[in-house]
Amino acid sequence: MTLKEVVLGIDIGGTSTVAGYVDRNGACIIEDLIPTLAHQPADQFFQRLHTFAKQLLEKLGGGYSLRGIGIGAPNANYYKGTIESPPNLSWDYVDVKKSMAKYYTVPVALTNDANAAALGEMMFGAAKGMKDFIVITLGTGVGSGVVANGKLIYGADGFAGELGHTIYDSNGRICGCGRKGCLEAYASASGIKRTVFELMAKSNETSELRDVSFHQMTAKMIFEAALRGDVIAKNAFEVTGKILGMKLADSVAHTSPEAIILFGGLAQAGDLIIEPTKRSMEEALLNIFQNKVKIIPSAMPEGNSAVLGAAALIWNELK
Ligand SMILES: [Zn+2]
């Protein structure tokens, strides 16, 4: 019997960690999650992860051969195979490759979740066949993965592609990183909430969002209100798109991409976010780049995208 080749894709998050087995064509055969329990020592986490991944493979009932393990994690360093001072995890510095080597002999690679998303789009999603593109993840934070000349850019230290922490307004909102006015403080899920509250403070416009507290409000609620014609909600998308488009125009000047792919929670608003972003980007672009760069939504299956991205990292190495 020939064994079917699979890779293990793992996405380590602050609350839960998702793992799944993915074949060469990007089919996720099985996927499940465990709590990360990030307050416990990292050693315990990797031990639990191994047991969990083993059980997951056993559920498939044999016939599979593991070719490698790809991991997406916050502040992951591709070159060193480490996680360094990750946000939302109490681990200070973890040698992930070394921890995984206790349990596995197959190749292990890791990178941050935005880079994993970019590789996922390149191998299985909206960037198939593209050599120059940028994926921007609009979720709890704002991340980006830059592919130029067919290669994901890791940079000199492995941390390339932090578009979310480039500055839009040096006197602007405080960002999670401690500095002022980063793109992330505007174009993340909490960024658009902050915009809604600013717009409500500045006008008397009625809005269904006025009865919702900051804590309860979600980006999805803003999206749904905008679809129902809520002016504040629609304006919040306009403002977000304007800022995002300006920053994307800067990125276009760096690598001249064929397309920019919007990924993650806010990107699910579709044209509500894409249209103002595109308009603002075109306005800010140098003439040689105008009307050339597409802005498109992710084409990864919503539920499995994190695991597929992590798996794409290792499939890409095995190519
Ligand atoms: Zn920042």
Image (cartoon, grey):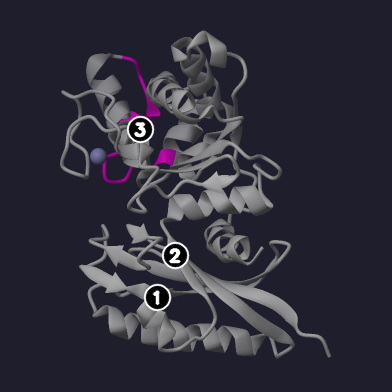
Q: In the rendered view, does 256 fall on the left or right side of 254? A: right
The residue nearer to you, when weighing 4 against 158, is 158
Contact check, label 2 and label 1, Cβ < 8 Å: yes
Q: Amino acid at mark 2?
A: Leu
- Residue depicted at x 49% and y 45%: 264
Q: How many marks are shown on the rendered structure?
A: 3
Residue at position x 84%, y 90% from top? Answer: 1
Left or right: where 150 falls relative to 105: right
In the picture as drawn, the residue positioned furthest to the right comes out as 1
Give the structural element (helix, strand or loop) at label 3. helix
Q: Identify the residue at image location x=28%, y=14%.
A: 204
Q: Which residues are magenta?
A: 205-219
Q: Which residue is mark 3?
A: 192
Residue corresponding to mark 2: 110
Indicate which disc residue 97 carries: 1
Dot 1: element = helix
The residues tagged by marks 2 and 1 sit, at their Cα atoms, a distance apart of 8 Å
Most prominent secondary structure in the magenta stretch? loop
**Residue 150 locus on image (x, y percent):** 60, 44
Say which amino acid is labelled 3.
Answer: Ile
In primary-sequence order, the first of circles 3 and 1 is 1
Q: CA distance from mark 3 to mark 1?
A: 36 Å
Query: Disc 1 residue type?
Result: Lys
Q: Is mark 3 within 8 Å of ligand 1?
A: no
Looking at this view, is 167 or 17 the one in front?
167
Q: Is residue 289 visible?
A: yes
Residue 87: quadrant of the picture: bottom left
Q: Toward which corner of the image does residue 47 lie, by quadrant?
A: bottom left
Relative to residue 231, is residue 117 depicted above or below?
below
Q: Counting residues from the N terminus, which is met first, the one under dot 2 or under dot 1?
A: 1
